[in-house]
Image (tube, helix red, strand yellow):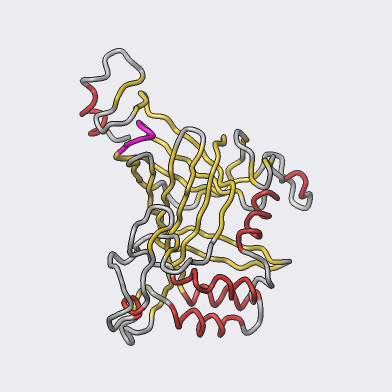
Amino acid sequence: MNFTKLACCGALVGASLSMVACDGGTTSNPPVTQVYVVSDLSIPTNTGTMGVGFNLDGQVDDGTGTTCAELTPDLTSTITSATGVDNAFAALVPQLERTLLMGRMIGALVGEQITAGSFILLMEVSDINSYTSDSAVQVRLILGRVPGCVSGMPATCMPMVSGATIAPGQTFEQVMVLGSAVSGSIAGGRMTVSTPSLPLALSIGSSSLTLTIRNASIGAAISASALTNGEIGGSLQIEELAVSAESLMAGAGATVRTVVGAVADLEPTTADPATCASIGIGATFNAVDAEL
């Protein structure tokens, strides 16, 4: 709980359980906790100079310079219009879908896993004083499942859906917490938070391709009922991606090192600054209210 924030507003509370916050939003007293479940997630390709993600290296690169980061032009966010977005992976999405994913679109694969109940990602946001402006909230990322889910009986693991996405208002069991709770904030009705690691496993037949997004930043418009216009940005370590690709298809690891390494835009190596060890990636998502 942010005691400094509460102290600055304490004189205004009086006997009311709801008030106008010192930072301009409607606040709850006591703070509330809200759980959301990701209802759709996609890794889109870029459109010209526009894409999704975050500025991960703190600079805006225009394609000039000497390091691999500087030589790869950054994008502008299609969601927030922020500049300096590091997402060189976006340009590789069509090739990835055509080769490693056997023609399947990433969004469709993830959507199938979500509605089948095999990828239930929950975000628990606590210490919410205001959905408009709040200097400190706590966020936990949790892998979950449908209560009563039985391995080998797919029908028992399927959540209720609305169209092609998860329906709101459902209860899920906690399977695994993805790291410790991290601090975030809300400004202008949009929550932002960073987490050290966000794993995403894409099932392809009996195999899977694991994308472990490192130093991930997450942003979304937040309300009591949903997270909308969500955006994820982070980096993929090329060697980790190569190992995962090799487990999916013999020889794919070498291809990843060559193809992805040629356009990688993060972590210039000391031995050769024109070579990067990681590549920026961006994703979009929406989430609906849920219970744990």
Q: Does residue 121 lie above or below 272 as drawn?
A: above
Quadrant of the snapshot with the N terminus: top left
Frontmost residue, 143 versus 190: 190
Q: Residue at x 64, y 39 (%)?
A: 167
Q: Is residue 158 left or right of residue 23?
A: right
| Residue 188 found in image quarter | top left
Find residue 65 and report its horizontal and vertical position in percent.
27, 81
Q: Is residue 105 visible?
A: yes
Quadrant of the snapshot with the C terminus: top right
Q: Does residue 132 lie above or below 87 as drawn?
A: above
Find residue 209 and report its horizontal and vertical position in percent.
61, 68
Q: Residue at x 67, y 42 (%)?
A: 146
Q: Is residue 292 visible?
A: no
Q: Does residue 167 lie above or below 153 as drawn?
A: above
Q: Residue at x 72, y 46 (%)?
A: 157
Find residue 190 and report its horizontal and vertical position in percent.
38, 43
Find residue 144 and report its horizontal and vertical position in percent.
60, 46
Frontmost residue, 117 versus 222: 222
Q: Does residue 1 lie above or below 144 as drawn?
A: above
Frontmost residue, 274 versus 94: 94
Q: Residue at x 65, y 60 (%)?
A: 109
Q: Is residue 98 left or right of residue 72?
A: right
Does the magenta segment cover residue 130? yes
The number of callouts visible is: 0
Which residue is outermost to the top?
15
The residue range painted magenta reads 129-134
Does the magenta segment cover residue 198? no
Q: Is residue 283 left or right of residue 49?
A: right
| Residue 5 found in image quarter | top left
